[in-house]
Amino acid sequence: MMKNKLITLTAAFLITLVSYAQTDFSALDKLKHTAETVITPDMFELIADIDFDASDEEAKVLDSMLSSLSEIRIYATEDAESSAVLNTFVNALIGKKKMTKLMHVKEESEFFSLHIKKLNDNKVSDLVMLINDGESEAGETVFIVISGNLDMKQIGKLASMMDMPGGERLQEATRDE
Amino acid sequence: MNNLTFRLHRLKIVLTVLSLALLVVGCTSEPSLQEYIVDSAERPGFMSTSVPLSMMPVETSELTDDSREAYSSVRKANALLLPRQGTDSMLLEQEKKKLNNVMASDRYTNLISHKDDGMKIVLTYEGDKADGIDEMVLYGYQDSLGLGVVRIMGENMQPNKIVRLIRELQQNSMDNDLDGQKSKDNDLISVINRLKL
């Protein structure tokens, strides 16, 4: 009897743990002068079983990738205050998830960093990109987070297709080592 | 003792009435998108249009069973616009709030959203993941342009089947072209192509 209870409790604990693993982005909802784009897990679920015209090489890559993605969020701002909030948020996220830094580039006024949370040798569950670009106040901050069950090699291709900010850097980072 | 049961009984009645009242208020204070569109369409400044799918010239007899099912799952498309030009900015603000309220209902599942200063655009749907989509809604506003809602209504629409249906229609129209007969389906295909569906 006692044992059963223990198992139920452990299971309940694990379930809450798993649901807590989902990052809470509500802190970024009300950022001033900030563009926010979200592609939700429901979207990826909905289009996962659509078979695109497989004769096209790009569509093939896209098709296999779509089923491995679960969420994309992009935040961009030129507001100094919001930029500070974003930077703090990203650093906290990287710390909390114990993500590893894959690369960073610093040149002139631009600072780019790429962090990942590895599932195993070639799979990644989260990918966080942070770009701070700006000489003075009028800088721009871009924060991109992609989650799912991602293949590192495909991420670079995705970036080049979607014409995302930071795409070039991402391609460099994911090129065959 | 008797007094206590009586009190408890009364408490129960009060609670029941209260929860019923809450239920009624809850239902009426959440206007549906349907109501919003119907009510707004009649007001000055708004433009609206509704296209039943049966108006599309599609030869259903040429389709496979799956595609015919996909075709009949879509009922109509419907749009409501409030252009910025000629609209009082107070009214636009007011309508933005109203629309946001309607769409905040948890019966909608957001797919893609984008917002920035003075603009917002959301693709969302109502329906069940397993059974399909009953309503696909694209809504948004931009302060310089105005406000708009476009929705596609149907019953258990399956995105993968609809994509296949479109591909089949394209194939059919190509075959017809090869036969040297200009099919009337072409009109639909060109419309779809233009819409980049």
Image: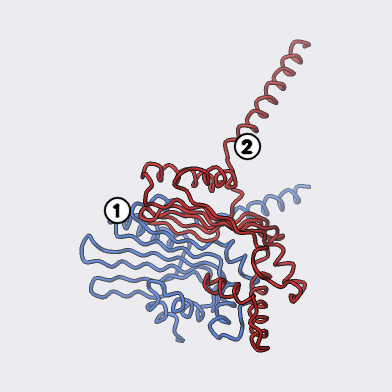
Q: Is residue B4 left or right of B171 when viewed as pictured? A: right
The colour with which the image depicts chain B is red
Residue A71 lies, in percent from the top left, at 53, 64
Q: Is residue B96 left or right of B169 when viewed as pictured? A: left
What's the residue type where badge 2 is placed?
Cys
- Which quarter of the image is occupied by the N terminus of chain B? top right
The colour with which the image depicts chain A is blue
Where on the picture, by quarter, is residue A105? bottom left
Which secondary structure lies at badge 2? helix
What's the residue type where badge 1 is placed?
Glu
Q: Is residue A145 left or right of A17 when viewed as pictured? A: left
Residue at 60% across / 72% down in the picture?
B188
Q: CA distance from mark 1 to mark 2?
A: 40 Å
Task: Please state which of residues A28 and B163 is positioned toward the viewer in this rendering.
Answer: B163
Marks 1 and 2 in Cβ contact (< 8 Å): no
Which circle marks residue A1 in the picture? none
Which secondary structure lies at badge 1? helix
- Please name the residue that numbered disc 1 is placed on: A81
Residue B49 lies, in percent from the top left, at 55, 55
Task: Please state which of residues B163 and A72 is positioned toward the viewer in this rendering.
Answer: B163
- Please name the residue that numbered disc 2 is placed on: B27
- Which quarter of the image is occupied by the C terminus of chain B? bottom right
Residue at 43% across / 42% down in the picture?
B94
Residue at 67% across / 53% down in the picture?
A10
Asked if one can make out residue A131 in the rendered structure from this viewpoint, the answer is: yes
